[in-house]
Image: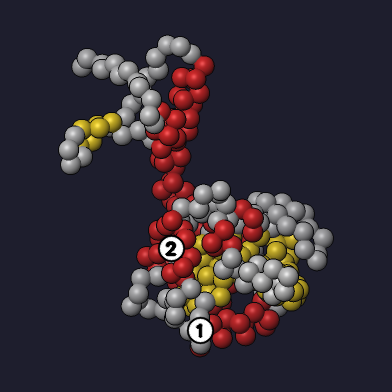
Amino acid sequence: MSGVERDLADYFLDAINNDYLITVLITSHTQGKIKSQNLPFGVGKTTLAWWLNYYMNGRDWELVFQRSVYNPYDLVRLLKPGTERKNAATWDDVQATAPAESGVPRALRRLANFLTTQRPEVACLIMTAPNINSISSPLRKLVLFEVIVAERGKYEVQKIVYHKNFKRPLEDIGRLEYLHEGEFSPLPEDVLKRYQEWRVKEKLKLYPALETEMYSYVKMREWEKTEGPITLQAPVIKTSREYVIKLPHPLGEKLHGKQVQIALAKR
């Protein structure tokens, strides 16, 4: 881990001692100074993130897992005001739960704004994603360092700096400043095994929503191609005034404002 400790340590220590936040994004599907394999997955982004978290949190693997999340809700729980300030936290695979979209959810904007408040509850937020364009715009604008994994075990660090655009003063110009490059080792076998189990558990939290959305998508495609009825299971819920059928968002968006016929099955 030579290089990372020496060159980024000053920034990390400043964030800890002066009560502000540094946001680091580790990518791999990007060409930097080093000739890269340009692969989005499987080259060691998370391995490097775990090492950074390990060194920032006093070389304690237990703290690494306590302070690592896979979705923005769990990150918010780490940021609860009044809790112990963390030297570092990791948000793995940000593009899975905070992707770049044309319409940014208000919750993600609020999260980004909360991270910029005085003395945030974490000094260094380490995120991983294939590239910076794959994550939500409000989070993208918070990134101060991009660490590019060119190949497994090899990385470079770029600092993102902004300059005034004097011709268009409301639009700052972002540029990269190359800092250094270095190497990192594989995770210890027991840590790697624990991480793999952790990741499966975290992905299972997201799977039910994905499965429901894909089911609705397939059924919607079937409905668009046929004149006959389709079968769909949906819960009936009670609102303050009436009972309604709750449809998944993609299907409800398609059917909003339209007349539909419902066939009730006998039981």
Question: Is 245 drawn above or below residue 72 in the view shown?
Answer: above
Instruction: Answer with left or right where residue 24 lies relative to residue 89.
Output: right
Q: Taking the image as drawn, is residue 54 in sight?
A: no
Q: Amino acid at mark 1?
A: Ile
Which residue: 72% across, 74% down?
Answer: 166
| Circle 2 crowding by C-alpha within 10 Å: few under 14, some 14–19, many from 20 | few
Give residue 146's position: percent from left, percent from top.
Answer: 66, 67
Q: Which residue is mark 1?
A: 16
Please provide percent x and percent y for residue 257: 38, 29
Q: Residue 248 lies in what quarter of the image? A: top left
Return the residue found at the far top. 228
Per the image, label 1 sits on a secondary structure element best described as: helix
Residue 203: assigned label:
none
Residue drawn at the location 47% of the way across and 60% of the way down: 109
State how far apart marks 2 and 1 are (Cα): 23 Å
User: Of residues 172 and 195, which is closer to you in this image?
Assistant: 172
Q: Position of residue 44 (x, y in %)?
A: 65, 59
